[in-house]
Amino acid sequence: MIEVRGLTKRYRDRSVVDNLSFRVGPGAVTGFLGPNGSGKTTTARVILGLTEPSSGTATIGGRRYRDLRHPLREIGALIDPGGVNPNRTAVEHLRWLAAGSRLHSRRAEEVLGLVGLAGAAGRKVSGFSLGMRQRLGIAAALIGDPPVLVLDEPINGLDPEGICWLRTFTQALAAEGRTVFLSSHLMSEMAMTATELIVIGRGRLIAAESVTAFTERADSSVRVRSPQLDLLEVALAGAATSMWRVDDALEVAGIGIERVGAIARNLGVQLHELSPQRASLEDAFMRLTADASEYLPQPAA
Amino acid sequence: MIDSLAMEWQKLRPLHKTSRMVALAITMAVVVSAIVAAAMASNGAQMSLSDRRGFDSVGTSLQGINAAVLVVAAFGALSVTREYATGMIRTTFLTQPGRLRVLTAKLGIHAAVAGVAAACACLAAFAVGQALLNSAGLSVGWGNSHLAAALGGGVIYLVLVCLWGAALGALLRSSSSAITWLASLLVVAPVIVQILPQHVIDLFGRWLPSQIGQQAISSSPNAHSFSAWIGLTVLAGYVAVTLVAGAWRMARTDP
Ligand SMILES: Nc1ncnc2c1ncn2[C@@H]1O[C@H](COP(=O)(O)OP(=O)(O)OP(=O)(O)O)[C@@H](O)[C@H]1O
Ligand SMILES: [Mg+2]
């Protein structure tokens, strides 16, 4: 269980994380979403005791990271694919982590096997691809067999096979009852991996709920097809917030599907289609964070 | 603390760099001692009897530590700065969140390695230096009453310089600036001081780390220098001040 309470981090006068509070519970993969620069990495670094917060707290199982006796046995982390001396071999890198956590050095080989790097154990990290480094970072996170995992952008650099592996892998870890906290840019990937979501924008909490609730909360539209579409469009204009044509269909937003059906019946128009359009996670995310995005492309003047 | 020490030792162990730096320090000490001793031996014939009596055979044989000192300082500095350069320091702090405990373990392990390397360097330099001085009848051999103090002084000097390097590394976090500072303090400063008027040198020269090192191995006291042990205490003071600043930065500034 990770708990963040009233967390604020200021760099000079700018609040990068602003009074952020949330909990990440065990037994689920929790996605951590936010546009670029919204403070995901900063939050993760505070949880991991690498950044001192301006105010507020972050605890793992009720204790601050710095108070953990052997942190790697309580929380595994992937914070950046660096953090490794490139002149060392993969197994050497993991052995000193094991030594610092009073773990048997055999754990080094074991976790390399878990992430599919057993064959590269004796190779220098300088010769590793980005994806291999990412896997090594995940192996390091797993070395203490921790009940909590914090992975900052673990998908970066992974090939489709690697992404698929990570998805099943993190889901299996969560199914064992572990707390898995995962940040990512790829909303569609998160929809497949996570069941819970924490969404932030400009360092503030936007949403903390299940993936299904999140998508449902986002505006959905209703799609109608009819031979008398023009008539229907005029009738709906007063009730809907917006409407647009897609090929031979009309999509209506801001109005329940039942009302659309009732209006059509009152008009006596024939319907060929009346269906709810679920927004994808990507759409929902962009709509919710649109006001909170700092770095939007500016149209050319 | 044991796991912090185990971690630092494990980090050091597979590094071929470590053994290469240790070998370099020993080689430089031996080579420079040999050159100085050979030069003295060839002059030996022209030396007067009183010159011979006042000749510091032990100190001459240990001149090589002046060459080893920069390697040892860099060894100390790199032990910290390399971790910041590769980002490995974050992994270190994730494993051992106590900043001061990490720094203490690092200093302990590196001082121990530097101590062993310095002892090997001093013994080898002395052996080679004495063999060369022997031809001119200037050797004193292993029974010399001053030998233990000079060897001990040389080793302590090198270990303190290694710690100084690590402290500067923690303060500056950059290999290049730490090594530039160390080179300036240990090698460039004594050269620059030479252009000052003699009475100024006599007053302030004693505070130079290089002078302190020279006195640590010398058996002839110099009126314008600190005695060996006072000098080493002064050097330990420099190290302590830098260490406090380095520890403060390591604990306070995010890695
Ligand atoms: N050490 C620092 N000093 C000053 N500003 C910083 C520092 N670290 C981060 N920031 C700023 O804090 C903001 C949030 O950064 P952070 O890396 O947490 O965002 P993020 O959500 O991880 O972004 P991304 O999705 O691009 O990885 C950014 O605007 C960044 O410039
Ligand atoms: Mg980030």
Image: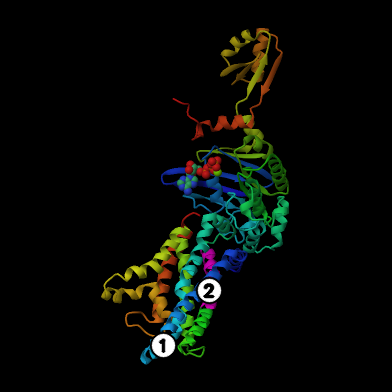
Whether residue A129 sits left or right of residue B200 in the image: it is right
Q: Chain of mark 2?
A: B
Which residue is at a point 60% across and 61% down the rendered structure image?
A: A69
Query: Disc count in the image?
Result: 2
Both on one chain, marks 2 and 1? yes
Which residue is at a point 43% across and 65% down the rendered structure image?
A: B182
The overriding secondary structure of the stretch rendered in magenta is helix
Secondary structure of the residue carrying numbered label 2: helix
**Amino acid type assigned to the residue bearing label 1 in the image:** Ala
Counting residues from the N terminus, which is met first, the one under dot 2 or under dot 1?
Answer: 2
Quarter of the view holding residue B198: bottom left
Residue extent of the magenta highlight? B100-121
Q: Say if mark 2 contacts mark 1, CB within 8 Å.
A: no
Q: Quadrant of ligand 2?
A: top right
Which residue is at a point 65% across and 46% down the rendered structure image?
A: A131
Q: Chain of mark 1?
A: B
Please say whether residue B98 is one of the residues in the magenta stretch: no
Look at discs 2 and 1 and give the one toward the viewer. 1
The residue under label 2 is B26
Image x and y of residue A239, in percent = 58, 16
Image x and y of residue A34, in percent = 56, 38
Q: Note whether ligand 1 is within 8 Å of mark 1.
A: no
Q: Is residue A295 above or below residue A78?
A: above
Question: Is residue A57 something one can see in this rendering?
Answer: yes
Question: Is residue A240 something one can see in this rendering?
Answer: no
Quadrant in the picture for the N terminus of chain B: bottom right
The residue under label 1 is B45
